[in-house]
């Protein structure tokens, strides 16, 4: 069984409003450094009062450009998120999968042309 | 007013003044009988831009009613005027923020909107949705506009139970970003905005996905029966109750104005259609 690191999101962003893509980037780096050594991550949002898509795009959406979906599902758990924010997270992750699929198809087409 | 004609006046004013440097500019309000206070965000952005070009701004000949509202919302205080107490608390103060001052912006929202006792009682979820919508726009100004400052102002209309909140930046326009991304110099200002507001469309090309912020606001405002207006470059775009109105101005505004109109008399529960399982959201 993999190690588990529990991350309180409010401690990473030094606040209770997750509204900045810069702060999201900090969380992304924290998650990513654990994923690189095959460590599971639990994100605790229970102290967070407000989350917007820009934060989730940079913190979690960005993971889909580096890791496969099954890997993310196996290594990441979300705790303490309001139900409407879970719905937002689903929109963000669906969008991220589509974005990186389109991006790789676009890059493949360019490589073929070149 | 916050409509096509009202914004057209501001765009024309921007066009007439944008090349002036090192002058004293006197702006005469003698023919202005009504000025919707939220539009101070746009006028303030234009005036600050003129001040940056070493101009001195003088605002004169206000009608009593216009002067009163611009003193209450602290707009005139920023341009050599004074301020007065807003006893009925219907104004959301005019303020300029550095784009990185998110904490200060959050405190402003809390003070002016969320903890404002004179606004009608809103459900906690409605407050959250309003707050999120405003932050999404603020973040767009940073990530797409690449600007240094944003200008904000709002107005509460007690009879209509409507709240207008306007955010303005003088950064990259939607037209510039979309034309560059799509490599299409033929697209008009309104067509570029129309493209940008569709879910999934984004001009981002890097490692962070996007393309959700505006569509989330549109979804919310449809249920809320509110309105969103976007002015960027020469494009004008608005949506109310699912009906889109779009047009092009004759001249461009070198930035982006977003006005959000919220219906505060909204008791929607915003219940979700389905309960998500953990395996569904990643």
Image (cartoon, rainbow, N blue to C red):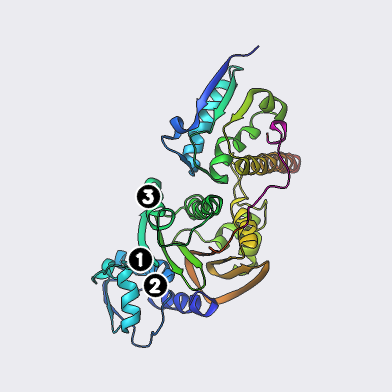
Do the residues bearing badges 3 and 2 touch, measured as CB atoms within 8 Å? no
Mark 3 belongs to chain: B
Q: Quadrant of the C terminus of chain A?
A: top right
Characterize the local packing of mark 1: few (<14), some (14-19) or many (20 or more) Cα atoms within 10 angstroms: some
Q: CA distance from mark 3 to mark 2?
A: 32 Å
| Mark 1: secondary structure | helix
- Which residues, given as a range, are shown in magenta? B268-281
Q: Nearer the viewer, mark 1 or mark 2?
A: 1
Closest to the observer: B252 or A39? Answer: A39
Separation of disc 1 and disc 3 at Cα? 25 Å
Question: Residue B112 got which mark?
Answer: none
Q: CA distance from mark 1 to mark 2?
A: 8 Å
Toward the viewer: B48 or B212? Answer: B212
Q: Is residue B54 left or right of residue B219?
A: left
Q: Chain of mark 1?
A: B
Label 3: state its secondary structure. Answer: helix
| Residue under numbered circle 2 | B18
- Contact check, label 1 and label 2, Cβ < 8 Å: yes
Q: Quadrant of the N terminus of chain A?
A: top right
Mark sitting earlier along the chain (1/2): 2
Q: Relative to residue A112, is residue B235 depicted above or below?
A: below
* Badge 2 density bin: few <14, some 14–19, many ≥20, Cα 10 Å: some
Give the mark toward the camera: 1 or 3. 3
Q: Which residue is mark 3?
A: B107
Q: Which residue is mark 1?
A: B49
- Lower sequence index among marks 3 and 2: 2
**Mark 3 Cα shell of 10 Å, populated few (<14), some (14-19), many (≥20):** few
Q: Is residue A46 above or below residue B23?
A: above
Say if the magenta span includes residue B276.
yes
Residue B156, percent across and down? 45, 67
């Amino acid at each position: 069984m993999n190690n588990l690191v529990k991350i309180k999101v409010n401690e990473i962003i030094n606040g209770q409003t997750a509204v900045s893509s810069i702060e999201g980037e900090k969380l992304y780096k924290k998650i990513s450094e654990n994923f690189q050594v095959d460590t599971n991550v639990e994100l605790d949002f229970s102290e967070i009062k407000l989350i917007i898509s820009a934060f989730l795009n940079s913190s979690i959406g960005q993971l889909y450009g580096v890791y496969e979906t099954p890997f993310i599902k196996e290594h990441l758990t979300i705790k303490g998120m309001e139900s409407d924010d879970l719905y937002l997270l689903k929109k963000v992750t669906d969008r991220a999968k589509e974005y990186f699929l389109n991006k790789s198809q676009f890059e493949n087409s360019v490589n073929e042309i070149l | 007013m916050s409509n096509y004609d009202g914004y057209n006046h501001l765009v024309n004013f921007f066009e007439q003044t944008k090349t002036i440097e090192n002058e004293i500019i006197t702006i005469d309000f003698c023919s202005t009988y009504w000025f919707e206070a939220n539009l101070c965000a746009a006028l303030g952005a234009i005036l600050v831009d003129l001040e940056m070009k070493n101009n001195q701004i003088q605002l004169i000949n206000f009608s009593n009613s216009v002067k009163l509202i611009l003193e209450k919302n602290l707009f005139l205080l920023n341009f050599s005027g004074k301020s007065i107490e807003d006893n009925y608390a219907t104004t959301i103060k005019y303020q300029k923020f550095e784009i990185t001052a998110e904490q200060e912006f959050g405190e402003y929202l809390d003070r002016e909107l969320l903890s404002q006792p004179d606004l009608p009682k809103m459900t906690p979820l409605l407050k959250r949705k309003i707050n999120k919508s405003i932050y999404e726009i603020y973040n767009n100004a940073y990530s797409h506009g690449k600007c240094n400052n944003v200008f904000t102002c709002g107005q509460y209309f007690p009879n209509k139970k409507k709240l207008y909140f306007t955010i303005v930046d003088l950064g990259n326009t939607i037209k510039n970003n979309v034309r560059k991304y799509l490599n299409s110099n033929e697209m008009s200002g309104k067509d570029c905005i129309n493209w940008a507001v569709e879910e999934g469309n984004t001009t981002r090309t890097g490692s962070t996905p996007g393309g959700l912020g505006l569509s989330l606001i549109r979804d919310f405002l449809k249920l809320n029966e509110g309105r969103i207006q976007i002015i960027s470059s020469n494009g004008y775009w608005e949506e109310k109750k699912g009906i889109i109105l779009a047009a092009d101005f004759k001249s461009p505004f070198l930035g982006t104005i977003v006005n959000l109109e919220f219906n505060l008399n909204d008791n929607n529960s915003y219940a979700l259609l389905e309960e998500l399982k953990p395996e569904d959201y990643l």
